Image: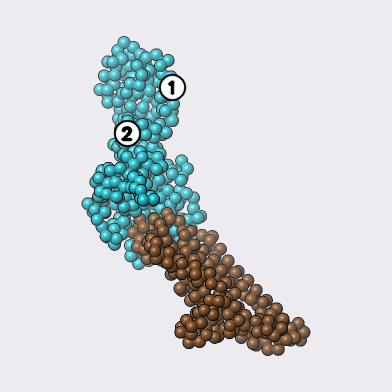
Chain colours: A brown, B cyan
Amino acid sequence: MNLLQTLFPNIDDWSELGRACVDTLLMLGGSLLLTVLIGLPLGVLLYLTGSGQLRPMPKFHAVTSLLVNILRSVPFIILMIVLMPVTYFLVGTKLGIRGAIPPLVIGAAPFFARLVETALREVQQGVIEASQAMGASLWQIVRHVLLPEARGGIFAGITVTAIALVGYTAMGGAIGSGGLGDLAYRYGYLSYKSDYMVVTVALLVVLVQLLQMLGDRIVTRYKQR
Amino acid sequence: MIRFVDVHKSYRVDGRDIPALQPFSLDVSDGEVFGIIGLSGAGKSTLIRLINLLERPSGGSIFVDDTEMTALAEPALRAQRRKIGMIFQHFNLLASQTVADNVAFPLRLAGERDAGVIRARVDELLARVGLTAHADKYPSQLSGGQKQRVGIARALANRPSILLCDEATSALDPQTTASVLELLAEINRELKLTIVLITHEMDVVRRIGDRVAVLDAGVIVERGAVADVFLHPRHPTTRRFVNEALPEEAASELAPFAQVPGRILRLSFRGDTTLTPALGRVARETGIDFNILAGRIDRIKDLPYGQLTLAMQGEHVDAALVALRQAGIEIEELHR
């Protein structure tokens, strides 16, 4: 304890840091789950409706694609502010973990959808043709061919998205969503307590490393096959 | 029975119709091995995909076992496709699934849920293609020939009446090709399965084909029994394919026969005549002399055949030719 006090003289409440960690993890977990739930079907839809694919719908594809690109091109911190009324409508607050999740999901889902679309494009056309020849329906192709064959790429996409979300949650801290970003901003930046900054940054680095390692491990397991 | 009636196909590219297959009609009988041979771009992979409607024709109708494929709505078409197995040049196996799961895949697609039934059928199929020991491996752990055997097992899973082979041996080495063709011939014999195969190698057709159609730039330029087409090719494209299968024969056609004394003849023996000493007997009886310039004895599917290029000399060559023809030998005069 003495050593910690010497190294980080300004941090007198370590439990606050602990809570911030938990908050960040909750925001990350919640938003990642919803991002995958929304982004995966969206990515499949983008893939299927693309030209030359199984259900080409050029207009629908163009419009969806444009929406996805617009959401991806707005910087997250601005997206968060712009979305405040939507957030309030959806979860009844603009603050805290609950307030953070809608903009996180709306920011990350289109990004993840694009990664899913790219991963699906990697699936060999021949395999899809073979399953059509076997009498597979569109749903069967998606469920039993496209998703399993692309799962390596999809897990890589989840990893990249999770890491992007770590960054987003930290930004969210600036406008009152809590978590590690909030601590770094309030204590580390506004109050000049640079030891807070050091600790939160270190924790974020560790978190990102862990996510990457876990993701890589899952991806290699599937890529070997 | 597969029947094409006035079928044609063109692709729309940049607002223009590019013809891929000129109007044609074609019948494939039950239980036969029908080869379609052509160079790449001749339209053969389009033709084979018309059978299970992976490609829709631009006009005409296609019947499979009296069902008009071209008139079926999507669910009925899917059900019909399950009765038509297909194997591919690049195997097209699911990389994420084991060998056993790949073979079980069409069963599951067809709605089979009983794990015991699936297991039993998969075991039976893997035994047929000789891969029982590899059931739990992934496709990436197999050789090309093994992958194609998985493809064959998968294609047979729903007990189809027709097997479509899309350049099934083109990615394999000669030895593996031979063993895969043997397996296909065995399946054709034992399961009475109709096989339609497309290839650019005459040798594939010679080994297992009953009938063949030669496709050149979207047109069927020649068709008939493999032995007829192989021994007496008429169209230049067919000749080219046959010569590729018989390099020594091609060389002999180019040889300067003009310098060889006598009449240059090509004799074709088929079936039993291959095994009789007709040539020697006729030579003795008519007193002609002959000199063998080139020749080979081989099989077309199960039919033994021989083809000899001879220079024939003597007073009674014409009489000898009559006697040889009577003995069932086909004769072409290459140079006089």
Name the chain under label 2.
Answer: B
Q: Is residue B228 left or right of residue B260?
A: left
Whichever of callouts 1 and 2 sits on the residue coming sooner in the sequence is 2
**For the view shown, which residue lies furthest in the top direction?**
B315
Can the viewer see residue A64?
yes
For the residues tagged 1 and 2, is the chain the same? yes
Q: Is residue A24 left or right of residue A143?
A: right
Distance, label 1 to label 2, CA atoms, is 23 Å
Name the chain under label 1.
Answer: B
Could you tell me which secondary element the residue under label 2 belongs to? helix
Residue drawn at (34%, 65%), measured in percent from left and top?
B112
Could you tell me which secondary element the residue under label 1 belongs to? loop
Q: In the figure, A188 relative to A53: above or below? A: below
Q: In the figure, B246 relative to A111: above or below? A: above
Q: Residues within 10 Å of mark 1 (few under 14, many from 20)?
A: few
Q: Nearer the viewer, residue B16 or B279?
A: B16
Residue indicated by mark 2? B229
Q: In the figure, B288 relative to B82: above or below? A: above
- Percent from the top left, x then y, of residue A101? 52, 80
Q: Residues within 10 Å of mark 2 (few under 14, many from 20)?
A: many
State the image quarter where residue A220 is shown: bottom right
State the image quarter where residue B315 is shown: top left
Amino acid carrying mark 1 in the image:
Ala
Residue drawn at (46%, 74%), measured in percent from left and top?
A37
Can the viewer see residue A158?
no
Residue drawn at (40%, 37%), measured in percent from left and top?
B203
- Percent from the top left, x then y, of residue B235? 33, 32
- Percent from the top left, x then y, of residue B281? 31, 19
State the image quarter where residue B282 is shown: top left
Q: Nearer the viewer, residue B33 or B255?
A: B255
Q: Which mark is residue B255?
A: 1
Amino acid carrying mark 2 in the image:
Val
